[in-house]
């Protein structure tokens, strides 16, 4: 079984190109289908070469850097093929679906299936993978919890998605940010713009140490298998996405979006935020190594 799990991790890894996957070029014609307004975003649907895509633009000017993080997170996720693809639309690009013409946006591939929140009659509607942070009321409720480790055992892709969220610092994996396609029996992670603000891996280490000291706690065989998949996914992320390369991509997407010296978007606040994301990327890389070591101990102890 362990050999199968490791082979599965290797089989889903892909060679990353120097540039992120391109969804369109400046020569492509995009046609607007419609635009809807949500609480936080303007969401438009456009058609390019017969394919329908989604355009997302934040309504709050203070949250425009979400464009950068959404694209960076999706690029990191490409190694597993468990997320949609995202391309930055520059602030100076006149693109159909951009409600605020002179601000950046993102173009997304549509996730197959529906969100697990929408699938009321599915077992996966009960999934709870969100690593609560600001809204957590106690240490036990915050970050990586024992229930999350159990939910991971429900499907082979779920430990990979949890590993991804740990690596990018995503504490917003609620049921509306995870899609499931019953026909293909596959998940797709979406909306990863609330990332690189915190070191979830460091906190996961604290949570796992607390679990290991709990004499009443144990792990089932299914949970251990899921933990092995999560561990191996973290190893692959650690090997593939070195801090310097990830930081280069951070500034690459920032430049694409319009956060450069020749643009008013690139103010002191934007510069400080980018520096903070850079610091979190470096810190997380160290924390991931510690987290993998702890997971190794758990696997050996409870297998």
Image: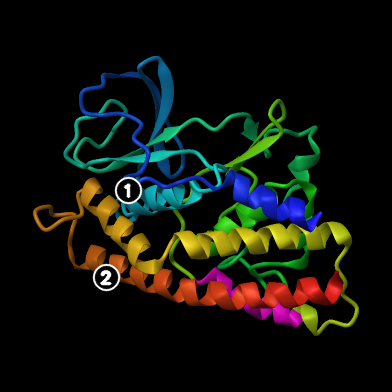
Specify whether residue 6 is painted magenta.
Answer: no
- Of residue 43 and residue 107, the one placed in the foreground of this image is 107
- Of residue 123 and residue 250, the one placed in the foreground of this image is 250
Q: Quadrant of residue 212?
A: bottom right
Q: Residues within 10 Å of mark 2 (few under 14, many from 20)?
A: few
Looking at the rendered image, the quarter that the N terminus falls into is: bottom right
The image shows residue 48 at horizontal and vertical percentages of: 35, 20
Specify whether residue 208 is painted magenta.
Answer: yes
What residue is shown with label 1?
A: 18
Residue for point 73% across, 53% down: 5
Mark closer to the chain start, 1 or 2: 1
Query: Is label 2 in a helix, a strand or a loop?
Result: helix
Q: Quadrant of residue 215?
A: bottom right
- Residue segment shown in magenta: 199-210
Query: Is label 1 in a helix, a strand or a loop?
Result: loop
Q: Which dot, 1 or 2, sits closer to the camera?
A: 1
Residue for point 13% across, 54% down: 264
Determine which of the numbered discs, if any, sits on residue 272 in the image. 2
Please identify the dominant SS of the magenta region: helix
The image shows residue 239 at horizontal and vertical percentages of: 49, 63
The image shows residue 144 at horizontal and vertical percentages of: 67, 67
Alpha carbons under labels 1 and 2: distance apart: 26 Å
Spot the residue most to the right.
216
Residue 2 left/right relative to 291: right
Determine which of the numbered discs, if any, sits on residue 189 in the image. none
Residue 63 left/right relative to 195: left
Residue for point 55% across, 59% down: 236
């Amino acid at each position: 079984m362990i050999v199968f799990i490791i082979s599965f991790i290797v089989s889903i890894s892909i060679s990353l190109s120097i540039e992120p996957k391109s969804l369109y070029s400046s020569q492509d014609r995009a046609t607007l289908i419609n635009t809807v307004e949500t609480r936080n975003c303007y969401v438009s649907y456009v058609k390019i070469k017969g394919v329908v895509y989604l355009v997302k633009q934040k309504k709050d000017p203070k949250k425009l850097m979400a464009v950068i993080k959404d694209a960076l997170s999706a690029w990191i996720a490409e190694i597993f093929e468990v997320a949609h693809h995202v391309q930055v639309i520059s602030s100076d690009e006149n693109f159909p679906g951009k409600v605020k013409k002179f601000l950046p946006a993102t173009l997304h591939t549509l996730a197959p299936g529906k969100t697990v929140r929408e699938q009321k009659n599915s077992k996966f509607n009960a999934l709870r993978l969100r690593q609560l942070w600001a809204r957590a009321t106690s240490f036990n409720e915050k970050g990586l919890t024992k229930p999350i480790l159990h939910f991971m055992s429900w499907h082979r892709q779920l430990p990979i998605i949890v590993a991804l969220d740990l690596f990018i610092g995503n504490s917003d994996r609620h049921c509306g940010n995870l899609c499931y396609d019953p026909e293909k029996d596959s998940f797709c992670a979406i909306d990863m713009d609330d990332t690189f603000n915190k070191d979830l891996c460091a906190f996961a280490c604290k949570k796992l140490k607390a679990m290991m000291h709990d004499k009443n706690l144990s792990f089932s065989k299914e949970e251990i298998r899921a933990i092995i998949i999560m561990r191996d996914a973290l190893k692959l992320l650690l090997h593939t996405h070195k801090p310097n390369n990830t930081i280069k991509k951070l500034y690459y997407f920032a430049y694409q979006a319009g956060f450069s010296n020749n643009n008013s978007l690139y103010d002191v606040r934007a510069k400080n935020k980018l520096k903070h994301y850079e610091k979190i990327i470096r810190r997380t890389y160290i924390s991931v190594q510690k987290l993998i070591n702890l997971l190794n101990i758990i696997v050996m102890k409870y297998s």
